[in-house]
Image: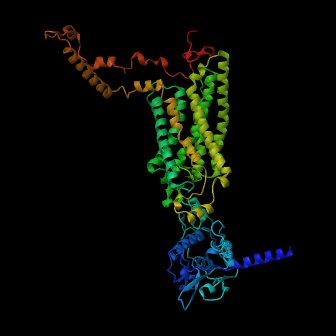
Amino acid sequence: MKLILIIFLLYVFQASYGQTLYPIDPSGKCEPYIGDTQSSPCSKFLNNLGSIYVSSNATQENAMKKLDEYFGILGALGGPECKSDSLTYKTLCAIYLPECESFTNNQTNITIAIPKRICYNTCNGVITKCKIPKLYFSCDQIEPVSGLPMFPSNYSEFNLTKYDVGNSNYTLQCLTPISDNTTIDIISTNCPHPLFYHNSTDHEADYDRGYLFVSDSSNCVIPNPVPIYTDKQWDQLYNLSNILAVLSTFGAGYLLVTFILLNPKITNFDRMYAFFNASVFMMSLSGVIIFIAGGPRSLIKDGGARIAVFEDPLCSSTGFIFQFFAISAILFWAYMGFDLWWRVKFMTKPLNIHKYYVPSAFIIAFILSVIPLATKNYRMVRGNIHCWVYKAPLQNTLFFGPLGITLTISTGFIGLVIYEIYKIVKATGRGGVLKLEIKPILNIILIYFSFVYIFAFNFHNDNNQQNTYGTIESFFQCTLESDDPSKCTIGGPSIGSLGYFIYCIRIYGVYCFLLQGLNKRAFKIWKRSIIFNNKLVLFIKVKILLMDNNNNVSEGGNSSTTAGGSTNINKNNNNNSKPITSKNTMDSYAFSKNNDSDSDSDDYDPYHKKQNLKQNDIEIGTINTNN
């Protein structure tokens, strides 16, 4: 047994010893240095410019591309001590452009070349000083062919006997460059793609101007839009925002024109809903203004290096408009929930608190909007599509706090509405009240869930930023390894979740249009409005009717013929017919204001005062007025 163990240990020792010999690439060669690139000035730091080792599967051109990338990483992540030490660059250049040693067989004229590798301690010291994560570069790498360390501790061993140019264990000491204690400043303007360089002397001040630096010691800034998605995906989100902003503005504007400008009988109910619709209109208009200016990309400045901030007029103006009218919309939406409960609970008793509620709502909205204006805290929300309050404490205090309170109160009123309807249905066995109030209920509930999602999305991201958003290190690693760095992303919330967030802040006008604007009352208001009852429209209608009448007379005069070829014309009809004039046409015209079909008997009556409605009068789909 002891003999077997000894043999095994000898075998392991021999195998381990054998693995210390580095293989020789017969096609490897020594070449003169091809010269610096704009980003990598290695000529200042290489020991022997006339002899650079190049293996059979490598070129100096590819080595220089790698050096450009790592010089950029040093510029982005390296600290001041790292970037000012010449040893950093001597080591980096020697790793990718190793010094070469050659041997020539005089008999065969075959020349072989071997590289002089950087020592492990030197490599590790530079990486530690520069705080380069192992995700980017590790000194523990091994060579793929031999499995030996890429950075030996002391020396590399080679077997030169195969080529008859030396002994079987030729040793080549590893390279340990020495710092010359000179201050180096050569990469201050280099940043790896897609980062931007910004010459900054005060990072905090430049952050307030819209720049986001990758580290406190770097002048490299994150591109915008933030690469949590690809450019194509960002364009999809921007298009979604633009389209919904236009549609929502149109929908809310249509309701204001219909029920306020064209409506001859404006009720208190119309006025209160108009305040909500006007707030939605202005919220959406802020998005339309951005769309006209060029879309959300118009809020990205300096070619993508920074985002728009308070000093940019487009940002501060649209941010204030959005905040002011978003708060107003929330407060008037809360009133709508209370009003709905009131109408179900007290069917014939009107609610007359608007004269107090309206000014109070606008005062609250103004206060919550002017604070970020006074403190210059409107800026583009990074990773989003518009300008808004940007500091989390201010956002929570001035928007999400009031939203949370409003949601809590409105949840109670929605529950009360459902309870009141349940009581009525249980008492009468009929559900007509649900049909009467179905559209207001849907409107409030749809907007309710939109507000809930906005609230939840914000707090989920705030509380899980470390997990939700990726790190700059993984983003850099992708740019180094990917054939198309533009497809690299930092990582963040799913595009679907952010897309639905955008949907929720832009959709309100569309909801209101579908649920309030497409009904008989709205159509009647337009039918009786000046739009369809003016001289130009009536003149066109008269001309059309005259043309139709002349065609009918002409066809009647040629329609009656006898078998013998004689034609009989009903002269009585011709004698009794009167010429069509503008006067008698307008009297019989379907758009007349005096037309019976346009009676006011079905004008909107939100509190059902005309029907004198009681709970036990409700039937499914009908209202019993024969008491």
Return the residue nearer the eye: 137 or 251: 137
- The residue at the point 46 percent across, 37 percent down is 250
Return the residue nearer the eye: 320 or 300: 300
> Outermost residue toward the bottom?
106
Q: Residue 415 location, x and y as percent?
A: 67, 29
Split into 4 quadrants, where in the image is the C terminus? top right
Q: Quadrant of residue 587?
A: top left
> Outermost residue toward the right?
2
Specify whether residue 160 is in view: no
Q: Is residue 296 above or below residue 534?
A: below
- The residue at the point 57 percent across, 78 percent down is 97
Q: Quadrant of residue 80?
A: bottom right
- The residue at the point 86 percent across, 75 percent down is 2
Q: Residue 270 location, x and y as percent?
A: 52, 28
Q: Is residue 174 above or below residue 200?
A: below
Specify whether residue 224 is in view: yes
Split into 4 quadrants, where in the image is the N terminus? bottom right
Q: Residue 501 location, x and y as percent?
A: 58, 44
- The residue at the point 60 percent across, 89 percent down is 165
Q: Is residue 333 left or right of residue 291?
A: right
Q: Residue 352 location, x and y as percent?
A: 59, 26
